[in-house]
């Protein structure tokens, strides 16, 4: 883990600092003894003391100028906030990430207090750690670790590190939710298949057998679709291939519409598409085709019989948008920000009848992100929805600012 590397570096740095200080202090003590024994007994004691004070200041000044600049620079390179103290608890080093906690306000005061507690325990020889949750904004989860610094059985000091594990915790939660959702989604068709097969055992009525076989076929198709979407999502979340190619979005839209024509006709849905501009983008054709198909397929699933679904491609300066509009059931405002989450469904009851896996829009979002773009949605319940996948015309490595300047100069 990153914090282990930080801790190891801190130990090395503080050992250098402490041992260097001790060498200088040893030299100083020897000089002090020499001065005291060689000094004029008739000289005022305060004169010798003043000379020793000046000598001590000179030694510490040399130490502070020679080594700590390089040590401090190395210490600042540690990604976590860190403080090092000597065996007496005197602070030797504090890196730039720990500076904001000095004389802090609000939640950062709690961080500084917890750091001092970890240092206190570390100076007693104990390695401890404590998680601290700050509600923010922004909300943060911090791991604060204190460790004693021991060399040759002697306590040299202590170090404390503050690691921001907010993103790590979020990703871990996403992973747990994903595993739970996959397990739930797979259990439904597998359970249905098992029940149908069990019911069919010993059945002799041809009509019942035909009905149950049809349902088994439906559940098998649903299970296969879920597995295919999971594989697609896993591949797409891996990012783009090393080399992008030129992709004609018009042909992608046309092929996707052709592949979904039968599904639209089955519900008597008028499926149309139009391209106002001949637009070519750099990217992964397979991913883009998957995203466009999912947009159209999602619109068809949630549009009632006799409705309309239209797809179009429109250029907006440095961007190009693939827009899919439908006259479907619409999405409540409270759900608009979540429809691109994996397995999120606005109406689970309706999803069961449409056969959706809950992964289609998540695939669309990941494809857009892979290509340096974004997704947008507007909707009104009972009226319909409009989904847009907006991509830079130059692909994921496109310099948008440079293109804007070029566009303005051309204009």
Image (tube, helix red, strand yellow):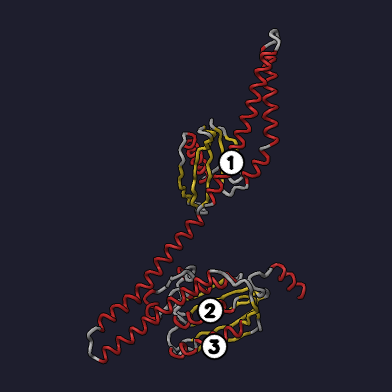
Q: Position of residue 382 (x, y in %)?
A: 44, 79
Disc 1 or 2, which lies upstream in sequence? 1
**Residue most toward the front?**
152
Disc 3 or 2, which lies upstream in sequence? 3
Callouts 1 and 2 close, C-beta under 8 Å? no
Report the disc number at residue 124.
Answer: none
**Residue most toward the right?**
409
Give the alpha-carbon distance from disc 3 to disc 1, as whole Å: 68 Å
Compared with 109, 198 (above or below) is below
Q: Nearer the viewer, residue 191 or 325?
A: 191
Q: How many marks?
A: 3
What residue would you read off at disc 2?
A: 290
Q: Position of residue 369 (x, y in %)?
A: 57, 69
Disc 3 or 1, which lies upstream in sequence? 1
Q: Residue, x 59% and y 86% (percent of image)? A: 274
What residue would you read off at disc 1?
A: 12
Q: Residue, x 62% and y 45% (percent of image)? A: 76
Q: Is 215 left or right of 19, judged from the image as shown? A: left
Q: Is residue 365 visible?
A: no
- Front label number (3 vs 2): 2
Compared with 25, 386 (above or below) is below
What residue would you read off at disc 3?
A: 272
Q: Nearer the viewer, residue 317 or 111?
A: 111
| Secondary structure of the residue carrying numbered label 2 | helix
Q: Position of residue 328 (x, y in %)?
A: 46, 81
| Secondary structure of the residue carrying numbered label 1 | helix
Q: Residue, x 59% and y 79% (percent of image)? A: 285
| Secondary structure of the residue carrying numbered label 3 | strand
Mark 3 crowdedness (10 Å alpha carbons): few <14, some 14-19, many ≥20: some
């Amino acid at each position: 883990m990153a914090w282990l590397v930080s801790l190891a570096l801190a130990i090395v740095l503080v050992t250098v600092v402490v041992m260097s200080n001790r060498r200088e202090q040893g030299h100083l003590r020897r000089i002090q003894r020499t001065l005291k024994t060689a000094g004029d007994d008739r000289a005022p004691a305060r004169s010798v003391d003043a000379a020793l004070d000046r000598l001590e200041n000179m030694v510490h000044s040399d130490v502070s100028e020679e080594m700590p600049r390089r040590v401090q620079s190395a210490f600042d390179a540690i990604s976590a906030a860190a403080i090092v103290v000597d065996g007496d608890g005197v602070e030797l080093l504090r890196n730039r990430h720990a500076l904001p906690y000095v004389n802090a306000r609000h939640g950062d005061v709690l961080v500084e207090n917890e750091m001092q507690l970890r240092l206190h325990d570390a100076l007693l020889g104990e390695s401890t750690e404590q998680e601290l949750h700050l509600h923010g904004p922004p909300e943060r989860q911090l791991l604060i670790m204190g460790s004693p610094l021991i060399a040759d059985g002697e306590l040299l000091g202590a170090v404390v590190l503050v690691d921001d594990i907010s993103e790590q915790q979020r990703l871990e939660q996403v992973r747990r939710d994903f595993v739970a959702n996959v397990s739930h989604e797979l259990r439904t068709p597998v359970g249905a298949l098992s029940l149908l097969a069990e019911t069919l055992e010993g059945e002799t009525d041809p009509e019942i057998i035909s009905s149950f076989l049809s349902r088994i076929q439906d559940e098998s198709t649903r299970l296969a679709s879920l597995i295919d979407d999971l594989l697609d999502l896993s591949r797409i979340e891996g990012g783009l291939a090393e080399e992008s190619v030129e992709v004609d979005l018009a042909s992608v839209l046309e092929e996707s519409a052709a592949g979904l024509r039968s599904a639209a006709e089955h519900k008597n849905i008028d499926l149309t598409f139009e391209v106002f501009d001949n637009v070519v983008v750099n990217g992964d054709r397979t991913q883009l085709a998957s995203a466009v198909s999912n947009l159209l397929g999602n619109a068809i699933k949630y549009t009632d019989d006799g409705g309309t679904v239209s797809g179009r491609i429109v250029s907006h300066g440095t961007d190009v948008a693939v827009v899919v509009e439908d006259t479907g059931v619409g999405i409540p405002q409270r759900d608009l920000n979540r429809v691109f989450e994996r397995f999120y469904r606005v109406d689970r009851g309706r999803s069961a009848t449409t056969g959706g896996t809950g992964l289609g829009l998540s695939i669309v979002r990941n494809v857009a992100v892979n290509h340096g773009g974004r997704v947008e949605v507007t909707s009104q319940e009972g009226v319909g929805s409009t989904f847009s996948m907006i991509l830079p015309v130059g692909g994921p490595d496109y310099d948008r600012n440079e293109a804007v300047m070029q566009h303005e100069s051309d204009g």
